[in-house]
Image: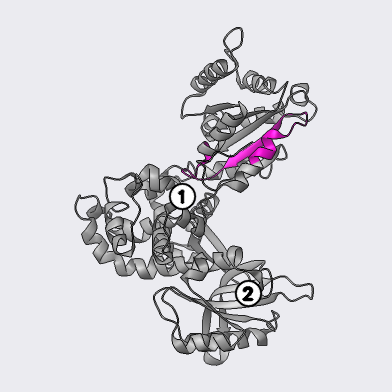
Amino acid sequence: MEKPSEMFDRDGEWAALDRFVSNAKPGATLGVVSGRRRQGKTFLLDAVVRATGGFYFGATEAADAESLRRFSDSLTRYANPPSAFHFADWFEAVDALLALGRERPVPVVIDEFPYLARANPELPSILQQAFGPLRPERTGSRTRLLLCGSAMSFMGRLLSGSAPLRGRAGLELLVAPLDFRMAAEFWGIGDPALAVRTHAVVGGTPAYPNEFLGGDVPRDLDDFDDWVVRTVLNPQTPLFREGRYLLAEEADVRDPALYLSVLSAVADGNSTRSGIASYLERKAVDIAHPIQVLEDIGLLRRDADAFRRNRSAHRIAEPLIAFYAGIMRPMWDQLQRPGMARRVWQASRHRFASKILGPHFEQLGRDWAMYHADPDLFGGLPTTVASGVVPDPAAKTSHEVDVAVIAASDEGRPRLLAIGESKWQDTMGRGHLDRLERIRTLLAASERFDTSGTRLMCLSGAGFNGHLAGLAAERSDVLLVGLDDMYA
């Protein structure tokens, strides 16, 4: 199955789908494809169906009877039976899908499956019975059924715990946003400094540059401010309200205002549960459920502290949500009035640099170290890259580590391959290196990690002074990582 030339990247996803739908082994199989809206799931699955002559059905929000009638009509047009299908229930409908694969492997896609299951909660159980291991309708079929959905909380539960379909699926595919380097290539941005700024606003969602913005991409750094004003802050563009819609689309979000307040607290720098609760003037127990839901739908991430057991920090996983919560939501009333975007942006640029760009650059540094850096640079392949806090009892203080690169070890203690500090706006110098040396000494004394080969890493969006560059040239344990390195 040849991937369409117009499809950007998605090589891994396409290969997984190819293996699933091309498998000629007898017996119908079930797969689940999930991902937030606008990541290209439908485009991907529609391409699979077109390449293989399969069947595609896109569900809508409708009553169960209407959905079943639409499904019957759609399958009639596809299969062209002697008489039109009029299914009495979904048991009959699913068996008709299994019958499509009697002669050959046939991919069948049910897109936006959560809409159907919301109207008929028994549907997962119906599929469970239809895909029973010894059921003749299944064993005599080679239908490759793919259930697709954007409601992340629902899709996440579909195969988990005691769910009816647990153990029935042969494919579980998450279509994620493009990572920061692929996003820059997709947007056609060659300047790393501009790529970081753009990614901090819109992330790696493929639909945004073309479908939402009509190909409007910032031309260069001088155009970036104008681009923000004419696109994401412009109430006449679809991107303006996208931050709100991403949350409202989730059925599990019962009180959007509370969830937006939690996200705003995190965007303002409150990363712990107690900090979020204090920001909202609520008890920590009152926000446990909203935090859990936001994690389930992929908008909030909880990252374990690299150095303190049972400690973690929350961060917003979707850049557009962070931009909306940190920049747009506090000024929403002004932004809704046409012509106010430039005034708001001028007043918000400092906040964008400190609250959005700075933390975003730190995360890109961790992603680079985990997924893109040459393992030889660290002396091993990382198993974990995280941030953390190291106590300094003698100085009665503590030190934040932006990037901790850790590898498993057969010797017992994990190897601390590198510790790093990230600065988006500051030119880094000897003082930053001295701080990292102090932290390495403290970690060596704790004896929790093997620090015999720990590198000291400075990551900067503004560069390094001559003194630090000279030290890095002389010392094998000092790594300087700039924007060109991260995007190389």
Q: Could one spot residue 139 in this view of the protein?
A: yes
Q: CA distance from mark 2 to mark 1?
A: 30 Å
Location of residue 101 (image quadrant) = top right
Q: Position of residue 187 (x, y in %)?
A: 42, 53
Q: Position of residue 204 (x, y in %)?
A: 47, 53
Which part of the image, by quadrant, shows the N terminus?
A: top right
Answer above or below: position of 49 versus 417: above
Q: Could one spot residue 311 in this view of the protein?
A: no
* In this picture, residue 128 sits left or right of residue 71: right
* In this picture, residue 440 sits left or right of residue 40: right
State which mark lies toward you, 2 or 1.
2
Q: Residue at x 35, y 53 (%)?
A: 217
| Badge 1 element | loop
Answer above or below: position of 103 versus 246: above
Location of residue 91 (image quadrant) = top right
Scheme of colours in the image: one colour
Residue linked to disc 2: 377
Q: Residue at x 68, y 82 (%)?
A: 453
| Badge 2 element | helix
Magenta region: 17-42
